[in-house]
Image: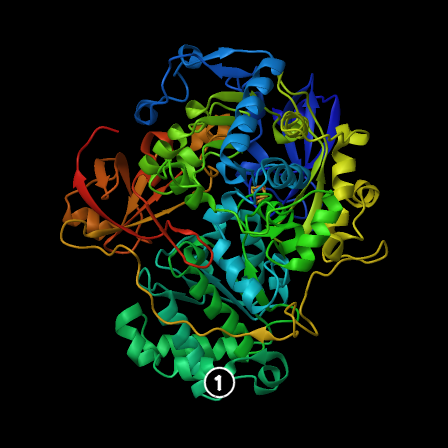
């Protein structure tokens, strides 16, 4: 039926969900998107997964915010009510009243300005969004840095690949991928670790499956064996939390069996001796009882990895979301280095980025320790450059990260760094942060919070002012995918009611904070912001002009001139570190912050599923996707279910020391014994009520992939 509709126009854009960055076309009739087709983009070649193809009608949901809202006087912010919330039927009119744009903006900026002027520049913080465009991310971080006066700006990269980026910046000098996903067609061996690509990066997974059909060997290393395992040559179902033990064992074999690429190491790496010394104690035989993988299998995989013409590592949040996430990524860097599997086709390091623009938002400086293009705020030259470029004084201290900001919101009144006011654009920390009861209390405790979003998210329920924003198909802008491709999306439909473009709203807040910005012109000022951002990131994207993007839709960076085709593979001759060499960093085993015990004997693993995205605010309002997966379920293996006399569909209550959910159980024999997997997209059974806010010390990423829980039969979902 969809395919037979006569449409008014076809508009080229990019999928708004995952970091693969599939190019697509919106088919529009009467200002409504009626269907979506895949385009021949470099990352997807016409392919789309179920989310990209059918997850579009959230933009036309009757639940869209269409008018600014102000909290009614005397209505308290009650974090507990979020546990009773029904997104479909809860009525916010008793909590908020409608307002004009002028009134809502004046109230918010007046309060934020007052907090800044009374308590100083650390009193405010901002969360931007990996769902917004590069231009929105750039302008948002510029507002926080130049208008709020500190570097207290972050977004969900902190919850996703912050530890991978910390290790990559330290090791190879760049936080982005070395090789693009579809380069796996040149690999002999594809090492997938801590990732469920068929669910989370489905089109990327198709390139892996194609390569495997042509003879490439896939190794899946994960405590949870997922669909890609069906295509794997070897599956390494290591015990949760033992990544470093297993990876060091692989490096041990490479060195001990004389398989290391000594020439590559001598010419291109530093600190190899320390690495060699460190992995001596990690023989596969010694690690077998720790990680649960037979020593012979580890030796076999290490040999194959070292001997492959090209071996590429692709990883997800199973690697990064641990208190030892940075160490996990350091081991991956060491593995490709000792084998010389980087800087050539079909090899290298690929952290599969989660959201559609988490790469671009980080590149644009939406992180507390870096200006755009990863210029450290503590670097005197970079600091001086941006002070000159933005013509203002800037803070030279890194700001607080996502979870730290929540702690600072609950800090004692005497703390000069207490966060008292926040501006949140397109993020939903009241669902996505760890230890939600704590995070929700922190948000509720703010003296002022303004939330800009397309739906009444759980975070918006705790706001003082809610500003209705535009969905992705309602504006022009660029996003950068996991492959370092800057890609252009064009406006396809009008925003509903009084909803405004995010870039317009940021500028209005900036004006209210005393900044005199006026980005106007093509695409409602988007082109002007892009041009400024291009200058700020000249070392990466100076060759990608706005005009070029209109012609080409997608250009890979680094790209420095108009003729530069971009660099799909990097580090061919040198790394991006100061001395051009890989800096190897040995890692030792650091256990999870909270281990199972007699009271909480199971391990909770959280993550995503194919049909729903992030906190579900969009995909749960996409008719087809919600019809396929309408209900939260927890996955357990058959043995554990049998031991607890559970049938598929029964209700269980899962409880950690921090919170609990009642949820239906589904059988999944890929989930290891002693563990339970819960997706975090469902507000009715919010997985993050249970998760642990303990942080990796380098990336400051929470340990979403491991905490101790108890499971009992029954409960009320
Ligand atoms: Fe969208 Fe990712 Fe699916 Fe592509 S693979 S259609 S980018 S969700």
Q: Quadrant of the C terminus?
A: top left
Residue at image mark 1:
273
Residue 648 vs residue 31, the one in the foreground: 31
- The single residue placed furthest to the bottom in the displayed view is 258
Direction from residue 56 to residue 422 in the image, left or right: left
Asked if one can make out residue 554 in the rendered structure from this viewpoint, the answer is no
How many numbered discs sit on the rendered protein?
1
The answer to whether residue 625 shows anywhere in this view is: yes
Tell me: residue 537, above or below residue 492.
below
Q: Is residue 336 above or below residue 120?
A: below
- The image quadrant that residue 517 belongs to is top right
| Image x and y of residue 150, in percent | 56, 43
Query: Which residue is depicted at the point 76% across and 29% down?
Result: 518
Q: Mark 1: is the Cβ under 8 angstroms from ligand 1?
A: no
| Pointer 1 local density, CA inside 10 Å: few below 14, some 14–19, many at least 20 | few
Q: Position of residue 461 (x, y in %)?
A: 42, 23
If the image is split into quadrants, where does the N terminus sit?
top right
In the image, what residue occupies the spot 42% across and 84% down?
Answer: 277
Where is residue 670 shown, x and y percent of the image? 33, 54
Q: With respect to residue 616, does 184 lie above or below?
A: below
Residue 288 placement: quadrant: bottom left
Q: Quadrant of residue 57?
A: top right
**Where does residue 380 sit, x and y in percent of width and height?**
65, 58
Instruction: Determine whether the residue tagged by mark 1 lies in a helix, strand or loop.
Output: helix
Residue situated furthest right in the rendering: 563
Relative vertical location of residue 280 with respect to residue 601 in this rendering, above or below: below
- Picture quarter with ligand 1: top right
**Foreground of the two, 431 or 628:** 431
């Amino acid at each position: 039926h969809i395919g037979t509709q006569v449409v008014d126009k076809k508009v080229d854009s990019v999928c708004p969900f995952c970091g693969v960055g599939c190019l697509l076309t919106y088919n529009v009739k009467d200002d409504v998107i009626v269907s979506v087709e895949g385009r021949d983009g470099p990352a997807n070649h016409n392919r789309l997964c179920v989310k990209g193809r059918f997850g579009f009608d959230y933009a036309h949901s009757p639940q869209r915010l269409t008018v600014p809202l102000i909290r009614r006087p005397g209505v308290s912010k009650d974090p507990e009510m979020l546990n009773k919330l029904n997104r479909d039927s809860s009525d916010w009119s008793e909590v908020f009243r409608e307002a004009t744009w002028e009134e809502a903006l004046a109230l918010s900026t007046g309060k934020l300005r007052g907090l800044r002027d009374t308590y100083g520049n650390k009193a405010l913080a901002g969360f931007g969004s990996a769902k917004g465009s590069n231009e929105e991310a750039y302008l948002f971080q510029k507002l926080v840095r130049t208008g709020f006066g500190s570097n207290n700006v972050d977004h969900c990269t902190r919850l996703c690949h912050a530890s991978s980026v910390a290790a990559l910046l330290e090791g190879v000098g760049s936080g982005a991928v070395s090789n693009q996903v579809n380069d796996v067609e040149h690999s002999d061996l594809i090492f997938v670790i801590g990732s469920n690509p068929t669910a989370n990066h489905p089109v990327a997974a198709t390139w892996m499956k194609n390569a495997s059909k042509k003879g490439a060997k896939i190794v899946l290393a994960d405590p949870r064996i997922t669909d890609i395992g069906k295509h794997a040559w070897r599956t390494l179902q290591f015990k949760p939390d033992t990544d470093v033990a297993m990876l060091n064992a692989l490096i041990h074999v490479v060195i001990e069996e004389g398989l290391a690429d000594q020439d590559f190491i001598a010419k291109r790496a530093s600190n190899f001796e320390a690495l060699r010394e460190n992995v001596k104690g990690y023989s596969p035989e010694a690690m077998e009882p720790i990680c649960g993988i037979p020593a012979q299998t580890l030796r076999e995989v290490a040999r194959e990895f070292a001997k492959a013409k090209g071996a590429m590592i692709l990883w997800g949040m199973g690697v990064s979301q641990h208190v030892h996430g940075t160490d996990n990524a350091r081991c991956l860097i060491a593995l490709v280095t000792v084998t010389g599997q980087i800087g050539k086709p079909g090899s290298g390091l690929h952290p599969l980025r989660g959201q559609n623009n988490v790469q671009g938002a980080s590149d644009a400086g939406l992180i507390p320790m870096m200006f755009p293009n990863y210029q450290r705020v503590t670097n005197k030259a970079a600091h001086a450059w941006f002070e000159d470029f933005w013509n203002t004084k800037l803070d030279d201290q890194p700001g607080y990260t996502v979870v730290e900001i929540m702690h600072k919101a609950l800090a004692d009144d005497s703390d000069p760094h207490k966060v008292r006011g926040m501006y949140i654009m397109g993020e939903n920390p009241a669902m996505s942060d760890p230890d939600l009861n704590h995070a929700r209390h922190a948000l509720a405790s703010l003296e002022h919070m303004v939330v800009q979003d397309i739906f009444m998210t759980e975070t918006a329920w705790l706001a003082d002012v809610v500003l209705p924003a535009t969905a992705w198909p309602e504006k022009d802008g660029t996003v950068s995918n996991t492959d370092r491709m800057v890609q252009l999306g064009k406006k396809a439909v009008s925003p509903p009611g009084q909803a405004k473009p995010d870039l317009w709203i940021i500028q209005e807040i900036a004006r209210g904070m005393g900044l005199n910005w006026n980005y106007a012109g093509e695409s409602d000022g988007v082109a002007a912001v892009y041009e400024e951002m291009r200058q700020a990131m000249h070392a990466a994207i100076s060759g990608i002009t706005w005009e070029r993007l209109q012609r080409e839709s997608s250009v890979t960076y680094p790209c420095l001139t108009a003729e530069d085709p971009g660099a799909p593979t990097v580090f061919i001759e040198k790394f991006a570190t100061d001395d051009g060499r890989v800096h190897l960093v040995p890692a030792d085993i650091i256990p999870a912050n909270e281990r199972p015990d007699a009271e909480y004997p199971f391990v909770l693993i959280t993550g995503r599923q194919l049909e729903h995205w992030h906190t579900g605010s969009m995909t749960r309002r996409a008719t087809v996707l919600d019809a396929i997966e309408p209900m939260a379920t927890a996955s357990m293996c058959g043995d554990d279910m049998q031991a607890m006399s559970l049938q598929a569909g029964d209700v269980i209550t899962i409880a950690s020391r921090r919170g609990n959910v009642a949820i239906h159980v589904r059988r999944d024999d890929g989930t290891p014994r002693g563990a339970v997997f819960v997706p975090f997209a469902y507000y009715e059974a919010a997985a993050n009520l249970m998760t642990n806010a303990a942080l990796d010390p380098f990336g400051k990423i929470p340990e979403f992939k491991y905490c101790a829980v108890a499971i009992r039969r029954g409960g009320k979902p």
